[in-house]
Image: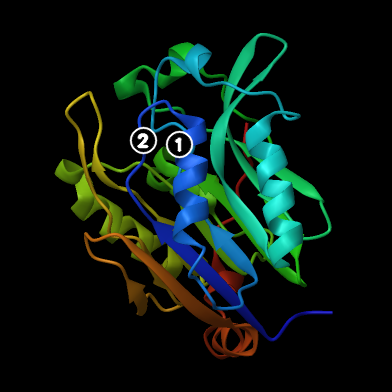
């Protein structure tokens, strides 16, 4: 059964560099006074460490403390929770989006497009799965940061309803972030949510936030600016389907195969 209105909550925060315990505590502290009921809580890319190219310092197994914390949080608050962390499996590192349901089900997506400009491809293995999951009757597509720049990889050939990007997107290219989030919503006729961080890292990069949510026509439903913020947005499944039936743009898209 499809939930008519899906409520998503975005946490736009600064991160403590390479310190999973401090980041988890900071997230917990911020939610002690948060009272809204929500269906999905969304955290940024590498929310336990920042965008580090030294994964050996922070990597965890899927049985590690951060995933255990996500499972406990989802169960206690009856909400799904998602964001990416550094995972190690068989001595290989992954930038992995982990999505945990209140029932304890775990869905994952490994970042397909590793960020070569920062050397991410040298230390993290790229993913091969499409990252599409089902939750509350909604079909949701999970993506991470640099994936945003590749429209073919994000193309809505499987009728997903919500496209999520978690990121550490820096200030010099924030106009591209704003523009591409809106473009991905328009071309795929889907809700798009982008979750970015604020603050600075030890490498001298500044992150200006600009987390946002767009509807199927590219209308801005929420924009978080450059301040720390927790925000909740309701998404309407009936409205999404109505727009698709009225305009039928997805029916005219080009066919292609991924190699």
Q: Residue at x 41, y 47 (%)?
A: 148
Please state the horizontal and vertical placement of residue 196, each as a whole percent of the image. 36, 51
- Asked if disc 1 and disc 2 are in contact, CB closer than 8 Å, the reply is yes
Residue at 58% x, 24% y: name it. 94
| Residue 210: mark in rendering | none
Nearer the camera: disc 1 or disc 2 = 1
Tell me if residue 123 can be seen.
yes
Q: Where does the C terminus fall, quadrant-wise? A: top right
Horizontal and vertical percent position of residue 30 = 44, 59
When the figure is inspected, residue 118 is found, relative to residue 170, above or below; the finding is above
> What residue did someone put label 1 on?
22
Question: On the rendered structure, is 164 left or right of 137?
Answer: left
Q: Is residue 111 visible?
A: no
Depth check: 232 or 182 in front? 232
Q: Which residue is mark 2?
A: 16
Q: Position of residue 59 (x, y in %)?
A: 57, 21
Neighbour tally class for label 1: few under 14, some 14-19, many 20 plus, Cα within 10 Å: some
Q: Nearer the viewer, residue 143 or 25?
A: 25
Mark 2, other Cα within 10 Å: few <14 / some 14–19 / many ≥20 = many
Q: Earlier in the sequence, mark 1 or mark 2?
A: 2
- Horizontal side of residue 18 vs 105, given as left or right: left
The image quadrant that residue 88 belongs to is top right
235 or 36: nearer the eye? 36
Numbered disc 2: secondary structure: loop
Q: Residue at x 67, y 50 (%)?
A: 99
Q: Residue furthest top?
A: 91
The vertical placement of 128 against 12, above or below, is: above
Which quarter of the image is occupied by the N terminus?
A: bottom right
Give the structural element (helix, strand or loop) at label 1: helix
Q: Marks 1 and 2, Cα distance to the nearest angstrom?
A: 7 Å
């Amino acid at each position: 059964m499809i939930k008519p209105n899906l409520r998503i909550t975005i946490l736009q925060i600064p991160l403590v560099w390479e310190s999973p315990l401090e980041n988890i505590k900071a997230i917990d502290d911020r939610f002690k006074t948060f009272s809204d009921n929500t269906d999905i809580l969304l955290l940024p890319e590498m929310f336990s460490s920042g965008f580090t190219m030294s994964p050996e310092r922070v990597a965890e197994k899927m049985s590690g403390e951060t995933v255990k914390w996500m499972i406990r949080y989802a169960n206690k608050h009856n909400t799904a929770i998602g964001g990416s962390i550094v995972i190690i499996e068989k001595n290989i590192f992954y930038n992995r989006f982990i999505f945990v349901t209140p029932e304890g089900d775990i869905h994952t997506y490994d970042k397909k497009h590793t960020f070569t400009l920062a050397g991410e491809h040298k230390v993290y293995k790229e993913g091969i799965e499409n990252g599409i999951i089902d939750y509350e009757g909604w079909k949701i597509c999970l993506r991470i940061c640099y994936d945003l720049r590749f429209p073919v990889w994000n193309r809505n050939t499987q009728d997903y309803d919500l496209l999520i990007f978690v990121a550490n997107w820096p200030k010099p290219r924030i106009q591209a972030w704003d523009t591409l989030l809106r473009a991905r919503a328009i071309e795929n006729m889907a809700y798009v949510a982008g979750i970015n961080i604020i603050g600075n890292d030890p490498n001298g990069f500044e992150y200006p936030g600009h987390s946002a949510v767009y509807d199927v026509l590219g209308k801005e439903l929420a924009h978080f600016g450059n301040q720390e913020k927790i925000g909740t947005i309701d998404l309407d499944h009936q409205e999404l389907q109505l727009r698709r039936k009225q305009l039928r743009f997805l029916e005219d898209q080009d066919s292609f195969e991924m190699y």
